[in-house]
Amino acid sequence: MKKNMGTSDKLIRTAIAVLIFVLYMTNVIVGDFAVLLVAIAFIFALTSYIEFCPIYWIFGISTCKHKNKEEAAAE
């Protein structure tokens, strides 16, 4: 898997995941909708950790910044 997520993308996804987990643990969000949001938060956290988003890969998107063409070709 080639990394396709940049630093700002990872930070935003992590912040959203943490926010959802906090809202769930404090019972601000409840029910089936809460379970769906927690699942999405888990996916956000996982993709941030591995720095790879399958949806980005399908559409050929990359928010990862490469310093030069040689480094990009090496990955």
Image (tube, grey):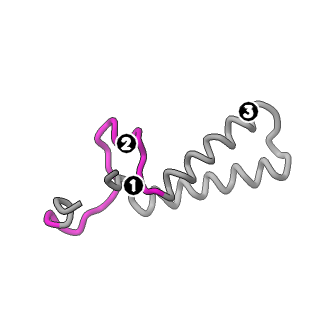
Check disc 3 and give the amino acid type. Phe
Magenta region: which residues? 50-70
Q: Is residue 60 magenta?
A: yes
* Residue for badge 2: 56
Q: Dot 2, how many residues are within 10 Å of its Cα: few (below 14), some (14-19), or many (20+)?
A: few
- Disc 3 designates what residue? 33
- Above or below, 20 against 69 in this view is above
Is residue 52 toward the left or the right of residue 2 in the image? right
Which sits earlier in the primary sequence, circle 2 or circle 3?
A: 3
Q: Residue at x 75, y 38 (%)?
A: 34
Could you say which is closer to the camera, residue 35 or residue 22?
Answer: 35
Q: Which residue is mark 1?
A: 5
Tell me the residue at 68%/35% (across/down). Answer: 36
Question: How far apart are the alpha carbons under marks 3 and 1?
Answer: 27 Å
Instruction: Look at the picture and state if 31 lies above or below 54.
Output: above
Q: Amino acid at mark 1?
A: Met
- The image quarter containing residue 18 is bottom right
User: Is 18 left, or right, of 10 in this rendering?
Assistant: right
The quarter of the picture where the C terminus appears is bottom left
Question: Is tag 3's residue or tag 1's residue first in the polypeptide sequence?
Answer: 1
Q: CA distance from mark 1 to mark 2?
A: 8 Å
Q: Is mark 1 in CB contact (under 8 Å) with mark 2?
A: yes
| Whole-number angstrom distance, CA of label 2 to CA of label 3 | 25 Å
Instruction: Indicate left or right for 42 with 35 as reference.
Output: left
